[in-house]
Image (tube, grey):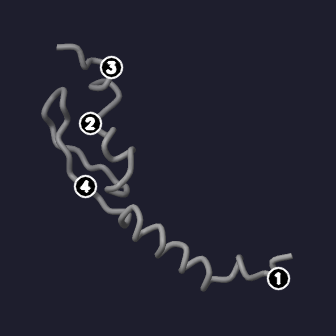
Amino acid sequence: MNNGRYSTEQYKQKQAEKVDRLYGPVLQHEKTCECCGAGFIFEGRIKTKEFSKAKYCSRSCANNRQK
């Protein structure tokens, strides 16, 4: 049906550029842990829910978030 146009490299590149415009490119961001105050690297897009939810450096800090 689609005559193979959705599997071409040109189409894939165009779609990747569209996603980068909407959510920002995938980059490494340095954030500070809310529990222990240590810095950690978050790799992802800046305009996503995942970026705003990344608050802790590790699973143990996330589990020990009571003060």
Give me the residue at 54% from left, 79% from top. 13
Residue 62 circle label: none
Q: Which residue occupies the extreme right position in the image?
A: 1
Residue 55 circle label: 2
Give me the C-alpha separation between circle 4 and circle 1. Answer: 40 Å
Local secondary structure at mark 2: loop
Q: Nearer the viewer, residue 61 or 34?
A: 34
Q: Which residue is mark 4?
A: 29
Task: Please identify the quarter of the rendering in which residue 45 is found.
Answer: bottom left
Residue 3 circle label: 1
Question: For the residue carrying disc 4, how many other residues have a C-alpha within 10 Å: few (<14), some (14-19), or many (20+)?
Answer: few
Of badges 1 and 3, nearer the viewer stands 1
Give me the C-alpha separation between circle 4 and circle 3. Answer: 22 Å
Give me the C-alpha separation between circle 2 and circle 4. Answer: 12 Å
Task: Please identify the quarter of the rendering in which residue 28 is found.
Answer: bottom left
Local secondary structure at mark 4: strand
Q: Earlier in the sequence, mark 4 or mark 1?
A: 1
Residue 63 circle label: 3
Against 23, residue 40 (above or below) is above
Amino acid type, residue under disc 1 in the picture: Asn
Q: Earlier in the sequence, mark 4 or mark 3?
A: 4
Local secondary structure at mark 3: helix
* Residue 64 image position (x, y, % from top left): 27, 17
Give me the C-alpha separation between circle 1 and circle 3. Answer: 51 Å
Q: Which residue occupies the extreme left position in the image?
A: 37
Of badges 2 and 3, nearer the viewer stands 2
Q: Earlier in the sequence, mark 2 or mark 4?
A: 4
- Callouts 1 and 2 close, C-beta under 8 Å: no
Question: For the residue carrying disc 3, how many other residues have a C-alpha within 10 Å: few (<14), some (14-19), or many (20+)?
Answer: few
